[in-house]
Protein backbone atom coordinates (compact mmCIF):
# COMPACT_ATOMS: atom_id res chain seq x y z
CA UNK A 1 0.00 0.00 0.00
CA UNK A 2 1.19 3.49 -0.84
CA UNK A 3 0.89 5.22 2.55
CA UNK A 4 0.23 8.63 1.00
CA UNK A 5 -2.55 7.47 -1.29
CA UNK A 6 -6.23 6.76 -0.64
CA UNK A 7 -9.40 6.43 -2.67
CA UNK A 8 -12.83 7.96 -2.22
CA UNK A 9 -16.26 8.14 -3.79
CA UNK A 10 -17.76 11.36 -5.06
CA UNK A 11 -20.90 12.34 -6.92
CA UNK A 12 -19.46 12.28 -10.41
CA UNK A 13 -21.10 15.38 -11.91
CA UNK A 14 -20.35 17.54 -8.87
CA UNK A 15 -16.78 16.33 -8.40
CA UNK A 16 -15.87 16.56 -12.07
CA UNK A 17 -17.19 20.13 -12.25
CA UNK A 18 -15.39 21.15 -9.04
CA UNK A 19 -12.14 19.59 -10.22
CA UNK A 20 -12.36 21.45 -13.54
CA UNK A 21 -13.15 24.75 -11.79
CA UNK A 22 -10.27 24.31 -9.31
CA UNK A 23 -7.83 23.57 -12.15
CA UNK A 24 -9.02 26.67 -14.03
CA UNK A 25 -8.11 28.73 -10.93
CA UNK A 26 -4.69 27.02 -10.75
CA UNK A 27 -5.56 24.87 -7.74
CA UNK A 28 -6.76 21.43 -6.77
CA UNK A 29 -10.05 20.27 -5.36
CA UNK A 30 -9.73 18.77 -1.91
CA UNK A 31 -11.76 16.08 -0.19
CA UNK A 32 -12.92 17.45 3.15
CA UNK A 33 -11.56 16.00 6.34
CA UNK A 34 -12.84 16.10 9.90
CA UNK A 35 -14.68 19.24 11.03
CA UNK A 36 -16.76 20.11 14.09
CA UNK A 37 -19.90 19.59 12.00
CA UNK A 38 -18.60 16.85 9.65
CA UNK A 39 -17.06 13.48 10.42
CA UNK A 40 -14.77 13.52 7.37
CA UNK A 41 -15.14 12.03 3.90
CA UNK A 42 -15.10 8.31 3.27
CA UNK A 43 -11.74 6.83 2.25
CA UNK A 44 -10.48 3.38 1.34
CA UNK A 45 -7.02 1.86 1.02
CA UNK A 46 -7.45 0.53 -2.51
CA UNK A 47 -9.65 0.69 -5.57
CA UNK A 48 -10.86 -2.87 -4.97
CA UNK A 49 -12.15 -1.80 -1.54
CA UNK A 50 -14.17 1.04 -3.08
CA UNK A 51 -15.53 -1.23 -5.80
CA UNK A 52 -16.61 -3.76 -3.16
CA UNK A 53 -18.44 -1.00 -1.25
CA UNK A 54 -20.16 0.14 -4.46
CA UNK A 55 -21.29 -3.44 -5.14
CA UNK A 56 -22.79 -3.66 -1.65
CA UNK A 57 -24.60 -0.32 -2.13
CA UNK A 58 -25.42 -0.09 -5.85
CA UNK A 59 -28.49 2.09 -5.56
CA UNK A 60 -26.86 4.67 -3.25
CA UNK A 61 -23.60 4.85 -5.24
CA UNK A 62 -24.84 4.60 -8.84
CA UNK A 63 -24.01 8.26 -9.57
CA UNK A 64 -20.66 8.15 -7.78
CA UNK A 65 -17.20 7.69 -9.25
CA UNK A 66 -13.90 6.68 -7.65
CA UNK A 67 -11.21 9.33 -7.13
CA UNK A 68 -7.61 9.04 -5.99
CA UNK A 69 -6.46 11.24 -3.11
CA UNK A 70 -2.98 12.38 -2.15
CA UNK A 71 -2.82 12.25 1.63
CA UNK A 72 -0.92 15.22 3.10
CA UNK A 73 1.06 13.09 5.55
CA UNK A 74 0.27 9.36 5.67
CA UNK A 75 -2.61 6.93 6.12
CA UNK A 76 -1.80 6.66 9.83
CA UNK A 77 -2.00 10.44 10.37
CA UNK A 78 -4.64 11.54 7.85
CA UNK A 79 -7.20 8.73 8.17
CA UNK A 80 -9.20 7.64 11.18
CA UNK A 81 -10.20 4.16 12.27
CA UNK A 82 -13.16 2.45 10.65
CA UNK A 83 -16.46 3.86 11.83
CA UNK A 84 -19.65 2.01 12.70
CA UNK A 85 -20.46 2.03 8.97
CA UNK A 86 -17.27 0.03 8.30
CA UNK A 87 -15.63 2.88 6.38
CA UNK A 88 -12.56 4.95 7.25
CA UNK A 89 -12.98 8.73 7.52
CA UNK A 90 -10.58 11.40 6.34
CA UNK A 91 -9.13 13.48 9.18
CA UNK A 92 -7.15 16.03 7.15
CA UNK A 93 -8.23 17.56 3.83
CA UNK A 94 -6.61 15.77 0.90
CA UNK A 95 -6.20 16.89 -2.72
CA UNK A 96 -7.95 14.87 -5.39
CA UNK A 97 -5.31 13.63 -7.82
CA UNK A 98 -7.48 12.08 -10.49
CA UNK A 99 -10.66 10.27 -11.36
CA UNK A 100 -10.28 6.51 -11.62
CA UNK A 101 -11.98 5.12 -14.72
CA UNK A 102 -12.82 1.55 -13.80
CA UNK A 103 -15.80 -0.61 -14.57
Image: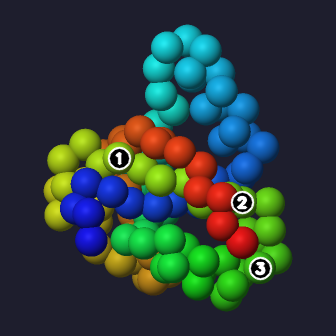
Question: What secondary structure is found at the residue carrying circle 1?
Answer: strand
Q: Residue at x 26, y 63 (%)?
A: 2
Residue tagged 3: 58
Vertical side of 103 occupied by 67: above or below: above
Vertical side of 7 occupied by 18: above or below: above
Q: Residue at x 79, y 60 (%)?
A: 63
Q: CA distance from mark 1 to mark 2?
A: 19 Å
Residue tagged 2: 64
Question: What secondary structure is found at the residue carrying circle 3?
Answer: helix
Vertical side of 89 occupied by 17: above or below: above
The part of the image, by quadrant, that contains residue 74 is: bottom left
Sequence order check, earlier mark of 1 and 3: 3
Does residue 75 appear anywhere in the picture?
no
Does residue 54 appear anywhere in the picture?
yes
Q: CA distance from mark 3 to mark 2?
A: 10 Å
Classify mark 2: residues with Cα within 10 Å, few (<14), some (14-19) or many (20+).
Answer: some
Q: CA distance from mark 1 to mark 3?
A: 26 Å
Residue tagged 1: 70
In the rendered image, which quarter contains the N terminus?
Answer: bottom left
Foreground label between 1 and 2: 1
Q: Position of residue 5 (x, y in %)?
A: 33, 57
Q: Residue at x 49, y 79 (%)?
A: 49
Q: Position of residue 54 (x, y in %)?
A: 66, 77
Indicate left or right for 3 with 95 as reference: left
Q: Residue at x 63, y 53 (%)?
A: 10
In the rendered image, which quarter contains the C terminus?
Answer: bottom right
Sequence order check, earlier mark of 1 and 2: 2
Sequence order check, earlier mark of 3 and 2: 3
Q: Tag on residue 99?
A: none
Amino acid sequence: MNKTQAFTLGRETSYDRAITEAKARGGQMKKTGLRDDYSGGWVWVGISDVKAFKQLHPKETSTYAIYELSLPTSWEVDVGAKGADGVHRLINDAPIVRKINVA
